Image: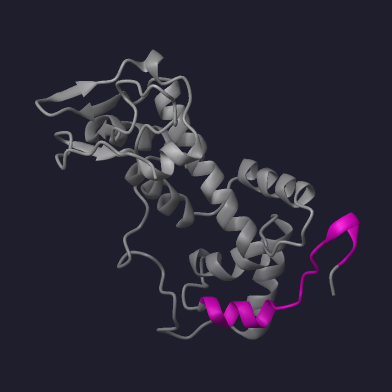
């Protein structure tokens, strides 16, 4: 079992590393994929020997993207790491953390399994809120062109029908347009309500309408029925 040296006290005005990862994941989950994200999914489809479904690929890609940004935050020194000792908060020397693997990011602690254990081994890792907020804004501008935070649940387009949606033909035409832009079936159903004039198209309704409309490519280029 991993030995996490947690003193039960958080670093002042800071967010634990694993919470930073989950926040990024949620931000990306609420927004459309960028072209680079779609390239990653395409590569994953090519490399994965199984016929993984679109939802699994989407979640896996979001996980990889969020982890990559967390690593960049630390390794490129955008966000210094902090640890809590028994007496005080201490900033971590960036050169003492040459890499961050999946286990460290998901646990939010410095865990290498090294023996003998170093000073950092097992300690929860923290990022100051001000540093993290600045880094989030930088990411949003790079990916989406503006620093606006993701919409709150009350601000997002409704996930269920509250008004009169467009006609079936209009929804299918919009779906075809979105598919031509490179969106998958799941992305189309999820994001259609963000398109102008389609605010009242529920995810489940769009999904049912376009189910089976676009053929996926399986192994060895085989079209899936």
Comparing 123 with 163, the one in front is 123
**Which contiguous range is marked in magenta?**
203-223
Which scheme is used to colour this image of the protein?
one colour
The answer to whether residue 83 is left or right of residue 164 is left
Residue 88 vs residue 144, the one in the foreground: 88
Find the residue positioned furthest to the front: 116
Residue in the foreground of this view, choosing between 67 and 119: 119
* x, y percent for residue 36: 63, 41
Question: Residue at position x 23%, y 32% from top?
Answer: 130
Between 51 and 171, the one nearer to me in the picture: 51
Q: Residue at x 39, y 21 (%)?
A: 116
Q: Quadrant of the C terminus?
A: bottom right
Question: How far across and down, in percent of the image, does residue 65 sit?
Answer: 54, 42
Would you say residue 209 sits in the magenta stretch? yes
Q: Is residue 164 visible?
A: yes
Give the vertical position of 175 relative to 115 (above or below): below
**Which corner quadrant of the image does residue 190 belong to?**
bottom right
User: Could one spot residue 142 in this view of the protein?
Assistant: no
Locate the N terminus by quadrant: top left
| Residue 74 drawn in magenta | no
What residue is rendered at 36% in x and 48% in y?
Answer: 23
Q: Quadrant of residue 84?
A: top left
x then y, percent, for residue 129 = 23, 36
Residue 131 pos. (x, y %): 28, 29
Relative to residue 132, is residue 52 drawn left or right?
right
Q: Could you tell me which residue is drawn at 64 percent across and 82 percent down?
A: 208
Residue ranking furthest to the left: 87
């Amino acid at each position: 079992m991993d030995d996490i040296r947690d003193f039960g006290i958080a670093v002042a005005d800071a967010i634990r590393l694993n919470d930073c990862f989950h926040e990024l994941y949620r931000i990306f989950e609420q927004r459309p994929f960028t072209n680079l994200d779609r390239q990653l999914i395409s590569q994953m489809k090519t490399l994965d020997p199984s016929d993984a479904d679109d939802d699994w690929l989407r979640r896996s890609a979001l996980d990889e993207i969020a982890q990559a940004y967390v690593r960049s935050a630390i390794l490129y020194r955008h966000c210094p790491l902090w640890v809590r000792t028994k007496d005080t908060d201490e900033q971590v020397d960036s050169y003492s953390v040459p890499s961050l693997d999946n286990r460290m990011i998901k646990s939010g602690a410095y865990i290498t399994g090294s023996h003998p254990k170093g000073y950092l081994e097992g300690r929860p890792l923290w990022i100051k809120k001000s540093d993290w907020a600045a880094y989030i804004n930088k990411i949003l501008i790079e990916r989406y062109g503006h620093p606006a935070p993701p919409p709150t649940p009350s601000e997002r387009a409704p996930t269920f029908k509250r008004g009169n949606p467009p006609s079936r033909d209009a929804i299918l035409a919009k779906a075809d347009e979105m598919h031509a832009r490179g969106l998958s079936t799941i992305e189309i159903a999820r994001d259609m309500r963000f398109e102008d004039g389609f605010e009242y198209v529920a995810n489940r309704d769009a999904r049912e309408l376009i189910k089976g409309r676009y053929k996926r490519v399986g192994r060895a280029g085989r079209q899936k029925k």
